[in-house]
């Protein structure tokens, strides 16, 4: 079914007081897609989700659901369901009645309710818990009930507003995969809001990076990570080193820029012009540290500043001649192999630089 | 806490407790006293319990009090709850002022309300009866209901209403299936407060009731001017017993719902 337009946002604007929290948003979401709205708090991602759900009305623009304009419809008339950040389970109802709520509102026959609720609870592995009250369950279990309560209605689109935010890291990782598998099993369109870039990269088919109410970049997870198009995206997704310089020469696919009085080779993928000020982004894991320059690599000389142990790798910070720090991911014992830490090289292949226009 | 502090606090609490309950216990004991004068214990009797059942004045005053309390409670609870919902849900210009105005009846002396109402009835040339006491009773109880329900609403998670709508419930269904059951303990507490305040209300009733109409407090007042009769003790005992049972039922009910921790 992938390919049919399920949700379309056309020039959607949302104004609160004097500021546009969502500013001219255009987005097509395909049926069966797992799409993530990713951005820092206040970027407009939750407001966008709430407009699709119907809790907020756009100031202007159109929202289409399965080809039908819905932006003026009340939430209870839309074929979408939401999993809330705080779960929002009804505390006065049992788990079973919580999950059955949507079906009861739609006047589904009793036997069918029984059957579908049981199936939904089984899907989230909580079929034994139907008679409990929500507060008798753990956070992770409440989260599953909230998911069951939404998917039992067979929505066309499931909206998830930072649903794993309150869980501890280990449970969150586990739930990420469970949600992804659930989405693949049910083949429902998921629109997922998060500020956690790792979560977005793990789960999504496509990621929409938002900043200040606008879309910065839409792409597949690896595109967002490997080929960021703006400085914001490069900086927000994962860790990176941003180097600022001036283009000194262009030669077809290749170009050079001047950084800290050294000439640095860069790929000419974004049609830079001579003397243009540009940024390049280089991920710490693409950089090597050594005492001698590497053949065919960019080699910048610097001074070892500090090492930060983070478990899987050690982050080594090297200060360049112009005072800028460059972070390198290396193995733990790498720095001990170096004899003269005042005189080291950071090296990377030119193709690992991502050129970002100012 | 240090043992000595604990001891002092305990004794102090006990004193306050006795201060509250000793007079009430005396009233209850003396309702069984076999003496017309009521101040000296002469023997046990149930005579007065029998005699108040014969007292048509007392019975009609009781009915009047209950009637006023029920009507007041219904009106004040509905209006107070609606006002609380409006104040909780919507933002509008002058909201703080409106909220403030709801606190005024709580602190304003009853006598002012009574005289104001009496003045209005005079201007409108209305004759006083049982129902002319209703507006006064509602006026002083509605704020209590509003404040209690508003307090309950402040701990209410608004996303629950969004969740209900998201699952297909319209405004009406959302209110009755989700909002109402969750704020019900607040509404019940407010209603109970309104009921007891109305039942207990003397000043407004005294001024705004018709000449032939008595409520219990008004009747008791006229009775004690001739000395505390055993019948007044009996009446008080019955009222205490009713209130005790009502509060007990509500308390147990709330505990069952898990609202009291």
Image (cartoon, coloured by chain):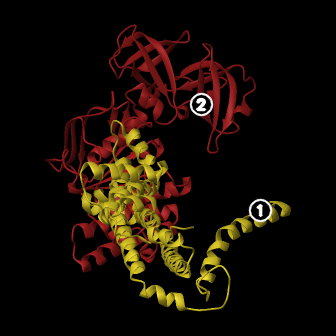
Chain colours: A red, B yellow
Q: Is residue A122 visible?
A: no
Q: Chain of mark 1?
A: B
Q: Indicate which label's residue lies in the foreground, 2 or 1.
A: 1
**Depicted A33 relative to depicted B33: above or below:** above
Camera-side residue of A63 and A56: A56
Q: Are marks 2 and 1 on the same chain?
A: no
| Drawn side of residue A122 relative to residue B43, left or right | left
Q: Chain of mark 2?
A: A
Tag shown at residue B127: none
Residue furthest to the front in view is B226
| Drawn side of residue A21 relative to residue A112, left or right | right
Q: Residue at x 47, y 54 (%)?
A: B151
- Quadrant where the N terminus of chain A sits is bottom left
Could you tell me which secondary element the residue under label 2 belongs to? strand
- Residue A181 x/y as whole percent: 38, 60
- Residue A137 x/y as whole percent: 50, 67
Camera-side residue of A53 and B259: B259
- Quadrant where the C terminus of chain A sits is top left
Residue furthest to the left in view is A68
- Residue B210 x/y as whole percent: 33, 64
Camera-side residue of A304 and B222: B222
Q: Residue at x 69, y 24 (%)?
A: A304
**Depicted B226 relative to depicted A354: above or below:** below
Tag shown at residue A328: 2
Tag shown at residue B9: 1
Could you tell me which secondary element the residue under label 1 belongs to? helix
Q: CA distance from mark 2 to mark 1?
A: 65 Å
């Amino acid at each position: 079914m992938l390919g049919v337009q399920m949700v379309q946002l056309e020039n959607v604007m949302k104004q609160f007081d004097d500021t546009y929290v969502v500013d001219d948003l255009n987005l097509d979401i395909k049926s069966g897609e797992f799409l993530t709205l990713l951005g820092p708090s206040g970027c407009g991602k939750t407001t966008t989700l709430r407009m699709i759900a119907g809790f907020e009305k756009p100031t202007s623009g159109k929202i289409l659901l399965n080809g039908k304009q819905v932006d003026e419809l009340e939430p209870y008339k839309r074929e979408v369901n939401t999993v809330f950040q705080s779960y929002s389970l009804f505390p006065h109802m049992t788990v079973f009645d919580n999950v059955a709520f949507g079906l009861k509102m739609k006047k589904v026959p009793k036997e069918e309710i029984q059957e579908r609720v049981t199936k939904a609870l089984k899907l989230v592995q909580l079929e034994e818990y139907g008679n409990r009250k929500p507060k008798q369950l753990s956070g992770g279990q409440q989260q599953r009930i909230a998911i069951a309560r939404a998917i039992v209605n067979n929505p066309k689109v499931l909206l998830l507003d930072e649903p794993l935010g309150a869980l501890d890291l280990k449970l969150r990782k586990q739930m990420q995969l469970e949600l992804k598998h659930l989405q693949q099993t049910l083949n429902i369109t998921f629109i997922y809001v998060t500020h956690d870039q790792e979560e977005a990269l793990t789960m999504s088919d496509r990621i929409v990076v938002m900043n200040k109410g606008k879309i910065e970049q839409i792409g597949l997870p690896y595109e967002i990570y490997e080929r960021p198009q703006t400085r914001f995206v490069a900086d927000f997704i994962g860790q990176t080193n941003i180097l600022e310089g001036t283009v000194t020469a262009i030669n077809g696919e290749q170009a050079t820029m001047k950084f800290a009085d050294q000439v640095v080779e860069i790929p000419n993928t974004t049609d830079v012009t001579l003397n243009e000020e540009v940024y390049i982004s280089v991920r710490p894991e693409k950089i090597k540290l050594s005492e001698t320059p590497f053949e065919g690599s960019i080699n910048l000389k610097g001074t070892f500043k500090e090492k930060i142990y983070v478990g899987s790798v050690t982050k080594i910070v090297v200060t360049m001649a112009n005072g800028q720090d460059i972070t390198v991911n290396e193995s733990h014992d790498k720095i001990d192999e170096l004899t003269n830490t005042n005189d080291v090289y950071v090296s990377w292949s030119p193709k690992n630089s991502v050129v970002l226009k100012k | 806490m240090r043992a000595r502090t604990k001891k002092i606090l305990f004794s102090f609490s006990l004193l306050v407790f006795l201060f509250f309950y000793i007079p009430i216990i005396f009233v209850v004991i003396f309702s069984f006293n076999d003496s017309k004068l009521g101040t000296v214990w002469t023997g046990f009797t149930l005579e007065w319990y029998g005699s108040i059942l014969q007292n048509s004045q007392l019975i009609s005053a009781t009915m009047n009090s209950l009637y006023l309390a029920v009507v007041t409670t219904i009106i004040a609870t509905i209006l107070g709850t609606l006002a609380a919902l409006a104040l909780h849900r919507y933002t509008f210009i002058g909201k703080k002022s409106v909220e403030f105005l709801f606190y005024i009846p709580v602190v304003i002396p009853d006598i002012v309300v009574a005289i104001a109402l009496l003045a209005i009835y005079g201007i409108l040339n209305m004759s006083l009866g049982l129902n002319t006491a209703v507006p006064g009773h509602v006026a002083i109880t509605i704020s209590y209901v509003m404040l209690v329900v508003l307090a309950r609403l402040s701990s209410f998670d608004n996303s629950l209403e969004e969740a209900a709508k998201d699952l297909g419930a319209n405004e009406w269904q959302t209110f009755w299936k989700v909002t109402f059951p969750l704020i019900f303990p607040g509404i019940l507490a407010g209603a109970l407060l309104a009921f007891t305040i109305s039942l207990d209300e003397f000043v407004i009733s005294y001024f705004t009731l018709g000449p032939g109409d008595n409520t219990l407090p008004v009747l008791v007042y006229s009775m004690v001017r001739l000395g505390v009769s055993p019948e007044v003790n009996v009446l008080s005992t019955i009222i205490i017993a009713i209130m005790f049972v009502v509060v007990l039922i509500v308390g147990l009910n709330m505990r069952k719902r898990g609202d009291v921790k």
